[in-house]
Amino acid sequence: MTDTPTRQSRLSPARLKRLRLPSWSVLAAGTVLGGLCGGAYGLLTPPTYTATSYVVAVPAEQSDSGAALGFAQAYGRVATQLAVLIEAQDRAGVPLRTLQRNVRAATSPDAPMVAVSATSSRPVLAADMANAVSQALIRQAGAAKDSTRVQLVQFSRAVRPTEPTSAPTWVTSAVGASAGGLLSGLALLVRPRRKDQEQGVIRAPAASVTVPAVAVDAAQR
C-alpha cells in the first residue's frame, strides 16, 4: 500500500518546517520553567537566621561624645578583624572561617553604637556568634581604654531569632519566573528571522505558460 499524494504533501519537509510554535509559547514556557527552578531553590535551600548584638561607646573622663562617636566607627571596622574573631571563636564554638563568613558589623553616623550581626541556619548559633564577637570586641576596647578614653559596654544582647531572614519559597518562585520570562523574551528578540517574515509576503512560484504550436509557426512565418 502506497501513500496518497495528499498524505505525502502533508508530511513533506517544507510543510513540517512551516509548522512552528507561536512566539508566546516560548515566553510562557520560559516563565514556567523559571518559576519551577526558583521554587525548587527555595525548597532545597535551608532558611537562614540573623541575630544582632549592640554595643555602645561611652566616653570616659577627659573625653566627649564626639570622640566616642569617632571610636565607635573605628571599632565597627575592627569587629570583623582577626584579632577579635580569634578571641571569639572559642566562646562561639565555631571555626574561624565560619565567623569570617557569617559575621558583619555596622555603625551609625549619628550614634556611637556598633551592631554585630551573625547569620546561620541555626537560630541559637546565630545568637551565640553575635554575642561572642561583641564580647570579644568589648574586651579589645577595654584593653585600650586608658589611651582612647573610650570604652565599649553592652547595650543589647543578641537573642534567638524566631523568623528566618532568607527569602520564602514564593519569593524565589516569583524571581525565577520573572528571570525566565525575561530571558525568553530576549531570546525571541535576538533569534534569526525567516526571509518570508522580513519581506512580509511569501512569494508564489512563477506559473508556466504553454504556447500553442500554431502560434509559434505563425510567428516564424
Image (spheres, helix red, strand yellow):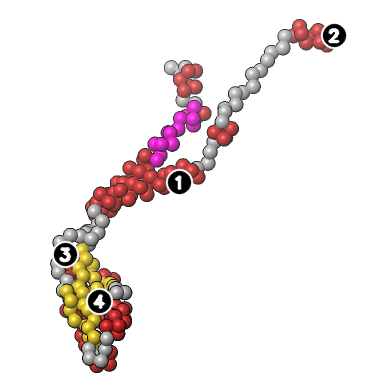
- Which residue has dot 3 on it? 161
- Which residue has dot 2 on it? 221
Q: Say if residue 128 shows up in the picture.
A: no
- Is 20 inside the magenta-drawn segment? yes
Q: Could you tell me which secondary element the residue under label 3 belongs to?
A: loop
Residues packed near mark 1 inside 10 Å, few (<14), some (14 to 19) or many (20 plus): few
Which stretch did the figure color magenta? 15-27
Q: Residue at x 24, y 53 (%)?
A: 168
Comparing labels 1 and 2, the label whose residue is closer to the camera: 1
Q: Say if residue 212 shows up in the picture.
A: yes
Secondary structure mostly seen in magenta is helix
Residue 116 percent location from the top left of the image: 24, 73
* Residue type for callout 4: Met
**Closer to us: 151 or 197:** 151
Residue 189 percent location from the top left of the image: 48, 43
* Residue type for callout 1: Leu
Q: Residue at x 33, y 42 (%)?
A: 32
Q: Earlier in the sequence, mark 1 or mark 4?
A: 4
Q: Residue at x 29, y 49 (%)?
A: 173
| Relative horizontal placement of residue 22, taking residue 125 as reference (left or right) | right
- Which residue has dot 4 on it? 113
Comparing labels 3 and 4, the label whose residue is closer to the camera: 4
Residues packed near mark 4 inside 10 Å, few (<14), some (14 to 19) or many (20 plus): many
Q: Earlier in the sequence, mark 1 or mark 2?
A: 1
